Image: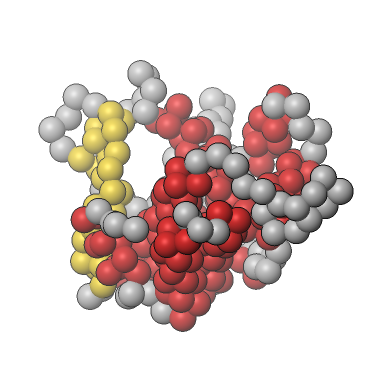
Amino acid sequence: MEYGKSEQSTIEAIQGCKCETKHCLNNALYHIEKAWKIKDIDLEMAVFRGITAEEEAASAIFHCLKKHRYQNAKKIQFKKHPTKLGLYPFLVHIYTCLYETYFAESGPFEKFRLGIIEISNRKAVELILKLKDQNFDARPRPPLHFTVSTFNTEDPLLRKPIMYDNDFKEKIQRDGRKKVWTYIVDIANRRNTVLYANSGGTPKVTGDVQKFLISQKDKVFLYSYIVLLIDPWEKAEGSSSFVQQVLDSYLLLLERINEEEISSFPSSVA
């Protein structure tokens, strides 16, 4: 499998990570490469390796959060497939919420992009926000150090961070699912359908496997970007409030914490 220039730069940047964070990302890429090589001779194993790559990349994020001691990170169930495979649809949901708010016609930003820079003698990913009708960009330091909160008209300084679990649950219910956990478990169980026989017979992969593997590769790089938006910045700039916000939201969704265990945020952060 070939990588573009930005992907090559990302692979180089990954090597600045340490221990499980680096090893999981490298192993995710290894599975993608192996899957690509066997896609024409063993479809089932190619798909399985593609799914495993996604799980390994998700694990890299979890290890990163635990390493940097984000509150509640120890409550992530690292070895459970639903925890790892449920992360992507949840992050897509959060991205959609942010985009519809901040990049809509009434939002402050025109577009965003990611860039590779040097920070603390390491390669890192920065977030670059193009402001509407302005000739300059916003570059948060660290990139994910912001809080999305509700606005109190009576007291503008009294704000409460938004948790994304309830919105995600409502979305799943609108799509015809009764329980979010059942939805996540169903996603995780698909990995077994490409390996094990059942009452319907032996497993058989259909569809465009090449397209699937490209999609899985994109997920691995998405998770790599997230790690590089967090890991290299911790030493120089400290932790990021939005990372904690998303972590707490995901743990609420998985019922690993309750509302009393949500991390506290500065009330004045918008």
Q: Is residue 191 above or below residue 94?
A: below
Front residue of 35/154: it is 35
Q: Residue furthest top?
A: 105
Residue that appears at 43% across and 53% down:
217
Give the percent coordinates (x, y) of residue 118: 21, 66
Q: Residue furthest bottom?
A: 19
Give the percent coordinates (x, y) of residue 175: 70, 27
Say whether residue 43 is visible.
yes
Left or right of 70: which side holds 77? right
Colour mapping used in the image: secondary structure
The quadrant the C terminus occupies is top left
Residue that appears at 54% across and 70% down:
63
Residue that appears at 43% across and 58% down:
36
Q: Is residue 259 above or below residue 35?
A: above
Say whether residue 255 is visible.
no
The quadrant the N terminus occupies is bottom left
Q: Residue furthest left?
A: 135
